Amino acid sequence: MTRPALRHPGRWIWLPLLVLIVIGLLRLRFDAEVFDLLPADLPVVEGLKLYQQHFANPRELILTLQGSDPDQVESAARRIAEGLRPFTNLVASAVWEPPWLEHPDEAAELVAYLWFNQPPDAFKALLHRFAAEQLAEEFTSARRELATALSPEQIGRLSYDPLGLTQLPGSAAGVAPSFGGGEQLFSSPRGAFRLVYVRARPELNSYRDCDNWLGRIKPLVRAALARQAGQSASSVTIGYTGRPTFVSEVAAGMKHDITTSVAGTAAVIALLFWLAHRRVVPMLWLLTLLAIILCSTLALGGLIYGTINVISTGFAAILLGLAVDYAVVHYQEALAHPGLSVPQIRHAIAPSIFWAATTTISAFLLLHLGGLPGLGQLGTLVGLGVALAACIMIFEYLPPLFPDRKEPGGAEAPLAEGARPADGAADRNVRAPGTRRMRPALIFTAALVAFSSVVLACLGLPRVDPTADALRPQHSPAYAALDQIENQLGQARRPAWLIVSGDTVGAVAERLRELQPALSQAVSNHLIESFTLSTPLWPRPEFQEANRPTARELGNAGALVGQVARTNGFAPRSLVLTERMLATWREAGASQGVFWPTNPVSRWVLDKVVARAPKSYVTIGLVDAGTNLAGLSTLAAELRPRGLRLSGWQLLGNAIFTRVRANMWRMIAPMLLLVLLSLWLAFRRMAEVALGVAVLLLSGLCLLAVMRAAGWAWNLLDMMSVPLVLGTGVDYSLFTLLALHRYHGDLAVAYKSVGRALLLCGGTAVAAFASLIWSSNAGMASLGEVCAVGIGFNMLIAVFLLPTWWWKLVGVRQYSK
């Protein structure tokens, strides 16, 4: 009896898809921001985004300079800053030393502002120092100290601050810019390592903006370094870090990942297809359809999301490796059965394609339950692509290759997959494989179980890495430069950031006041080691209002100060800082509302810890917990109900890992249920279900052994490989078992028809995931490693061991004589 063939529905069906693809391509954008990959509802992620938004200046580039001669390094830093400043269309500022040292007169405004924020009693005490008799005594004392001072810092301070106004009371004492101070922000103790801060003039909103701006800045830096008189440009090493560099690197890595992984996977597909079939036209037609599927999926992703993130670009290689399966299985079936028409082949293969595509699509869609939006987007793209690939390969791959077999012939179609002869009456009898033929498979099965068990028993399970390192690039000069800054400037222990926000300036000031005892208690309880708040730099509206009359009175003391200074032998340049402080107080006394300093030095300092918007105010503090991550997490939980966010990279990894680990069963349980359901609906027999599960269990055991032997660890991203290995791995068992049923247990025919195709399919899938090993992202690389090994074991076990298991458990009773 000839079964009805599965016919082509008509090519008009692709027209609506073409319209959607065009719209998607118009919407498509790429996103290189790492934080967009993370779950937005986690408090630590919220804190990181606030820090990134308000305090990690998106236009600030940091240059690191290192050499053997401190004088050369200092000269190079100065020349680079001076060489960049004339290019005002590119550079808003270039700072190579503390701004208050380069422009000491501009530091007066910030010092005056700090005084203006003092309690009224402390600020009013300045009036006594500006009385005529007291001024004369102050200048006399300063002149005596200058005559006997040996410290350069003391001489510098007295020369520009004879009245000692830079020496503030209380907690503000360590905040005020000091002459000769602040070098630790720009230079290592020896001076052989220095920093230059460069702020871009244009807005750097996209990765293209960052890349283009850096491309114009780097030649200017090299030219400035080369102009260093009498010195070789190679004597000083330059590094680049900061957001423009990070974004540019991520974008470059994204382009590299797409081109390298796609090109590499396509080359492997072409090579394996050629080795298997030695035919050029089918290979070229396959690559053409794969390119169409890839571009269409990317366009559909643009239609759904608008913006594709850096992690999701890894979908391309994965999709190529999975999409090729459906074409290869069809082609191998056509070669194995030359008497069948294309519609008959479709009808025979359709159940395998349906179940394989269903489990694969489900596996990738379940990534949405893992808690990482970036991987969820990748899962959607692969799921879309697999569905599209299944449809395109089923209906479009074979017709151009076999034009003479487009219509159903008179040959008997093979038994549809999943159908079985009636019990006790096989359509054809097949002799069971002899013991000699089955023995190698059974021995190899035992060897795999024994080897994996011994490795895991001796070495233990793979370790777990709960840090956020999986989110970092594998090889990043920008991260290397950042690590160098931390090591050279004595910041090896990166503190956590405490984000304090409020609707008004007063609300933030009140929160800072309440935080002081809470953090002091955390130090006493050994939750943290130390902390630093921005309280001295944050304005106190009530103090400023009470200090305005005093500020106006001090602002009018300029004439008296000048007269007394000249009488005591001080030149006018010695009074520059004092006069500017008096002018600032005069301005503050006449102001209304909250007074903020505005000159470049003040803005450079305040921008590091203060952010202002029309209806919100944010400041930042630093918390050092040493190695006590648990204590830091406890403190973060205690502060969260107060609306305070304690964040940092050391907290990020643990928070996301906890989320991912908690969500694992939300992904694995549905995937296991789907695997069992697929096996049951395909075979309706517990024996085949048990065999499919056995393949997954053995491949999982082998995967764990390989991971432990190779020293791989479970991290934030490669934990997601579990549902992927389950969903894609069960396909090989489905294809193999359905082929054994279709050919009534004939191992030779089943291998010729499906087994060889599965080897090719598995090889391309392994190659696709393995291509991610060279991904710029460390987590994607580890995900590719684990998936490649897991799927490889699934494929090999299903092709070479499963048929023997099946004959032992099922075939010997059903098909042999």
Image (spheres, grey):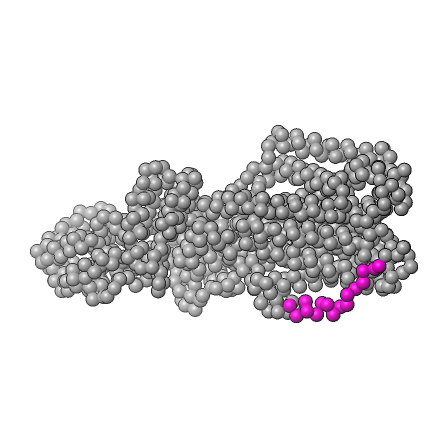
Q: Is residue 5 magenta?
A: yes
**Residue 124: x percent and y percent?**
15, 56
Which residue is most to the front? Answer: 423
**Of 815 and 534, the residue lying toward us:** 815
**Residue 306: x percent and y percent?**
56, 64
Give the left or right position of residue 766, taking residue 145 as reference.
Answer: right
Q: Quadrant of residue 701?
A: top right
Above or below 11: residue 439? above
| Rendered residue at 67%/58% (across/down) | 385
| Rendered residue at 85%/33% (across/down) | 436
Which residue is most to the left? Answer: 133
Q: Is residue 61 magenta?
A: no
Quadrant that contains the N terminus: bottom right
**Residue 725: x percent and y percent?**
66, 46
**Residue 754 in view in this figure:** no
Give the left or right position of residue 252, taking residue 319 as reference.
Answer: left
Quadrant that contains the C terminus: top right
Q: Quadrant of residue 432?
A: top right
| Rendered residue at 67%/55% (across/down) | 319
**Residue 615 in view in this figure:** yes
- The magenta-colored residue range is 4-20
**Of 415 and 520, the residue lying toward us:** 415
Q: Quadrant of residue 588?
A: bottom left
Above or below 16: residue 112? above
| Rendered residue at 44%/55% (across/down) | 49
